[in-house]
Image (cartoon, rainbow, N blue to C red):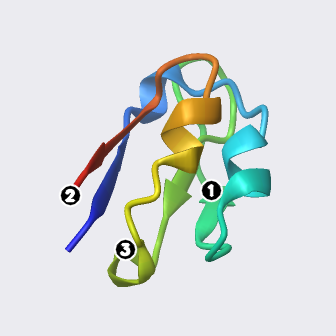
Amino acid sequence: MAKAIFHEERCKGCKLCVTVCPKKIVIMKSDKLNQKGFHPAGVDEMEKCIGCAFCATICPDCVIEVEK
């Protein structure tokens, strides 16, 4: 099973990862702020992740790692 790991402290909330996810499981955590003051991206339904790594590829801040 694939797993996307988000280093939330690096996230600047650009939402690029949200736009490229084919399964639409990457979300912005509106109830949480990181140390930079941004709402970080994350995944609530990790079991739906297919490990495509589109999110990790598009992220300009290396926030996301995908394990297969």
Alpha-carbon span between mark 1 and mark 2? 24 Å
Q: Nearer the viewer, residue 37 or 55?
A: 55
Q: Which mark is residue 68?
A: 2
Mark 3 nearby-residue class (10 Å; few <14, some 14–19, many ≥20): some
Give amino acid for label 2.
Answer: Lys
Picture coordinates of residue 13, whole percent (x, y): 72, 34
Picture coordinates of residue 55, whole percent (x, y): 57, 45
Q: Nearer the viewer, residue 6 or 54?
A: 54
Q: Nearer the viewer, residue 21 or 44?
A: 21
Q: Earlier in the sequence, mark 1 or mark 2?
A: 1
- Along the horizontal axis of the image, is 17 left or right of 15? left
For marks 1 and 2, give the one nearer the viewer: 2
For marks 3 and 2, give the one nearer the viewer: 2
Q: Earlier in the sequence, mark 3 or mark 2?
A: 3
SS at mark 2? Answer: loop
Residue position marked by numbered label 1 in the rendering: 29
Q: Quadrant of the C terminus?
A: bottom left
Q: Which mark is residue 41?
A: none
- Along the horizontal axis of the image, is 65 left or right of 28? left
Quadrant position of residue 21: bottom right
SS at mark 1? Answer: loop
Picture coordinates of residue 17, whole percent (x, y): 67, 46
For marks 1 and 3, give the one nearer the viewer: 3
Q: Is residue 30 visible?
A: no
Q: Is residue 25 visible?
A: yes
For residue 44, above or below residue 67: below
- Along the horizontal axis of the image, is 3 left or right of 36? left
Alpha-carbon span between mark 1 and mark 3? 14 Å
Residue position marked by numbered label 3 in the rendering: 46
Alpha-carbon span between mark 3 and mark 2? 12 Å
Quadrant position of residue 39: top right
